[in-house]
Image (cartoon, helix red, strand yellow):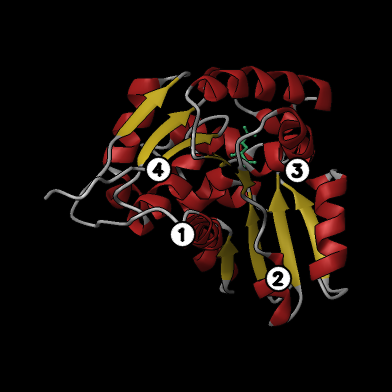
Amino acid sequence: MATSFKKPKICFFDSGIGGLTLLYECVRKLPCAEYVYFADNYNVPYGSLSEDKLLNKADGVFRQISLLKPSAAVIACNTVTARCAGYLRERYDFPILGIQPAIKPAAAAGSCAVLATPATADSWALKELAVRCGMGRTEVLPCPELALYIENNIYNIDKEKINALLPETRADSIVLGCTHYSFVKKHIEKYYSRPVFDGNLGTAEHLRTFLGNFDHHPENTGKIWFCGGDEKKNSHIFNNIETILK
Ligand code: DGL
């Protein structure tokens, strides 16, 4: 008799392409789930928006997500987690996970510098996380133009241009506080010659643990849909992500 198998349905949301790096990590950990990736590419950068605008945009997307009755939603955008996660969790009755900068593992090994969008850098959520997990040796450095540069030039990244957008720091390690930055993680590692952390693996592990009560059948692969923004671009980048991340 065939066993019944219910696939978890997980909705992702980022302003643009950044969350695809987290989606990639989650699909590797949970290949059997069904994923819907929501994005708003034409309005990047979210990191320059006021909190009111961010709440408005995030709520608009979450209203669509709620219609799908997901097993969970993942905020694949540090800016939206920092500014909107509390509000969204109060309004919606499905579980909402949110990526955050990986300060804890970085600060455990020494001082660290968190690179983030202006809206994340200036948020209470990040300040609280830095106090709670940063062991008094965490600095936060805003990178006002980096996410937009990556969004617009993903197929043709100019490393000199990236270098010009990276702030100086003497910290022992670097924490990527924006999912867009993960596309240039290898380059950032080379540039600073120091360890670089992002929140992708931790969030993917959290999602897997969270969905632990679902059956996982690795041979039973799920599907991915792209919804909103530049769907063609997001799908193309996702389908070529291993080459792009090299
Ligand atoms: N990828 C988003 C983040 O993780 C923000 C990029 C943007 O500014 O739109 O913060």
Q: Is residue 168 something that shows in the picture? A: no
**Looking at numbered disc 4 in the image, what kind of residue is underneath it?**
Pro
Question: How far is disc 4 from disc 1 in space, using C-alphas?
Answer: 10 Å
Q: Nearer the viewer, mark 1 or mark 2?
A: 1
Q: Nearer the viewer, residue 70 or 46?
A: 70
Q: Earlier in the sequence, mark 4 or mark 3?
A: 4
**Looking at numbered disc 1 in the image, what kind of residue is underneath it?**
Gly
**SS class of the residue under badge 2?**
helix
How many marks do you count on the picture? 4
Q: Is residue 51 something that shows in the picture? A: yes
Residue at point 47% right, 19% down? 229
Q: Nearer the viewer, residue 100 or 191?
A: 100
Q: Earlier in the sequence, mark 3 or mark 2?
A: 3
Q: Nearer the viewer, mark 4 or mark 3?
A: 4
Q: Nearer the viewer, residue 160 or 148?
A: 148
Question: How far is disc 4 from disc 2 in space, using C-alphas?
Answer: 29 Å
Farthest residue, direction left: 1
Residue labelled with disc 1: 212
Q: Earlier in the sequence, mark 3 or mark 1?
A: 3
Instruction: Please state the horizontal and vertical placement of residue 82, each as a whole percent of the image.
Output: 75, 43
Residue labelled with disc 4: 8
Question: How far is disc 3 from disc 1 in space, using C-alphas?
Answer: 26 Å
**Looking at numbered disc 2 in the image, what kind of residue is underneath it?**
Lys
Q: Is mark 4 within 8 Å of ligand 1?
A: no
Residue 104's tag is: 2
Residue at point 65% right, 63% down? 102
